[in-house]
Amino acid sequence: MTLKILAVASECAPFAKTGGLADVVGALAKVLGDHDSECRVLLPLYRSVVHLAEDADTVLDLGPRFGGPVRILSKRAEGIDLLLIDAPHLYDRPAQIYLDDTGRDWVDNHLRFGLLCWAGAVIGRDGVDGWRPDVVHAHDWQAGLVPVFLSQFDEETPPCVLTIHNIAFQGIFQPSTMGALGLNPAGFTQDGFEYFGNISFLKGGLVQADEITTVSPTYARELMTSEFGMGLEGVLRSRRDDLSGILNGIDTEIWDPGSDPALAQTYTSRTLKRKAANKSALLERFGLSGDGSEPLFSVISRLSEQKGLDIALQALPDAIERGARFVLLGSGSAELEKGFAELAQRYPDRVGVEIGFDEDLAHLIQAGADATLVPSRFEPCGLTQLCAMRYGTLPVVSKTGGLADTVIDANEAALAAGCATGFQFAPVTAEKLSDALSRAMDLYADRSAWQKQMRNAMKHPVGWDSSVAKVVSLYRGLAGS
Ligand code: ADP
């Protein structure tokens, strides 16, 4: 039996993306098609994707809801079946998905994502154009109320999986929003969606979902501790039998150094020498000196406290003094943006910094750098290190969450066994990162050892092959029960 899945998410690559959530939703929707499943992704019709409405079919008219008219459009684009929520009063806006043009959360984000949840629940219950999902898969807090709305219906509804991509974001709003959201006040309790006197989209979802997944086995364990659970560890411990960690993969068609159009030169593990042309292009792009023999470290990241880049700022000068080059692409915290701009001023011919979001440049950096830094304080899964490995760029990562699950540290034993794929360090301190950078530079000096490790990294499975089977088996278990 073909399994029908409705994915509900605020982001889906390549249409609307601020981070890894988009990559995962888009990639999973595509690969499910190869596993006897049909996945449709419910996504708001943001202004940035309004072109998708052209030639789309209207499959459901939900009438005036959450302050304006709401229609559901159906469209297949880039290999993904989309259901788009056309609600101009909430989504037809400039700027970023979550933030207004002053950089603050839109004041009506509870309505914008409340509608996403409610529409997801209605489609779960009634289906659209004769298609009714067997399972609803809600992603992160923006879809957290899907299982809550499903539980409010009298009719029979499909089971719901909720995936936590990052528990730092919980969707917490004033209790006065309950009426506008259409939530049943009976759920405003400690065992429901109430959280210290407010409404929490994520907590509501965690309580009501039939299954909870997160994006790596280590993060699943970490989430049940006070160090990582961000206040929801108790709720998660109470649901430990329904909580599992399934590693994310990346879209290995989009991230393929053998065919990537954003590269100066494509390459494979058999034509590794050709990778060097990307390093030259990158050094040139950032105006850095060197003949390519010096190690080039990189960062592609949101600049936030989570990502540990403040310690990178402390650790990098040593490596740069030793001759390393460094490039960064990212945006976020003003303090970190300033810190990296100052680093570039201090070492103008060794450090290049680009503040912004640039998909093509991210691909070129992955291809051109020798190593990429992900010194996160916590990291549910992390995709940057997976992309890096696919491109033969060795990750230097903190030993947490999905980073711990996906990178094999180049310690003596792993080097002797010939299976290392990168460098890990713990705890997350500038000192330990410095040690890891030194180890990387020492190994880099041994060309054949470094190249062996590059090949290992490129062979490491980073796609969805093994995880999608686990996801499908979870869906089938739920659909059959
Ligand atoms: P998170 O979702 O916490 O931001 P992930 O590692 O899971 O971190 O996913 C980040 C994704 O976003 C990766 O695909 C990465 O390449 C991409 N990314 C992050 N910052 C930028 C940027 N400034 N420009 C382009 N891509 C970026």
Image (cartoon, grey):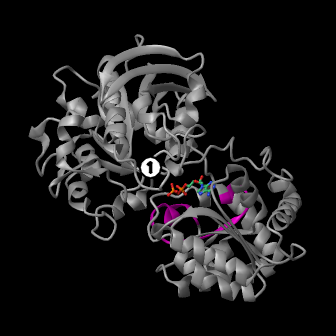
Quadrant position of residue 441 = bottom right
Q: Where is residue 227 in the image (x, y as percent from the top left)?
A: 32, 71
Residue shown at 35%/44% (left/top)? 109
Quadrant holding the C terminus: top left
Residue 285 vs 190, above or below: the answer is below
State the SS at label 1: loop
Residue occupied by mark 1:
246
- Farthest top residue in view: 130
Magenta-colored span: 388-407
Comparing 29 with 190, the one in front is 190
Residue shown at 84%/50% (left/top)? 266
Q: Where is residue 450 in the image (x, y as percent from the top left)?
A: 76, 72
**Is ligand 1 less than 8 Å from the beta carbon at label 1?**
no
31 relative to 160 in the view: left or right: right
Quadrant holding the N terminus: top left
Any part of residue 274 in sight: yes
Any part of residue 375 in sight: no
> Magenta stretch containing residue 399, yes or no?
yes
458 relative to 184 in the view: left or right: right
> Magenta stretch containing residue 256, yes or no?
no
Residue shown at 78%/84% (left/top)? 323
Q: Where is residue 381 in the image (x, y as percent from the top left)?
A: 49, 57
Quadrant position of residue 371 = bottom right
Q: How crowded is mark 1: few (under 14 residues within 10 Å), some or many (20 or more)?
A: many
Comparing 310 with 345, the one in front is 345
Q: Position of residue 22 (x, y in %)?
A: 52, 44
Quadrant observed for ligand 1 in the rendered image? bottom right
Residue shown at 77%/46% (left/top)? 260
Q: What residue type is labelled 1?
A: Ile
Residue 372 vs 124, above or below: the answer is below
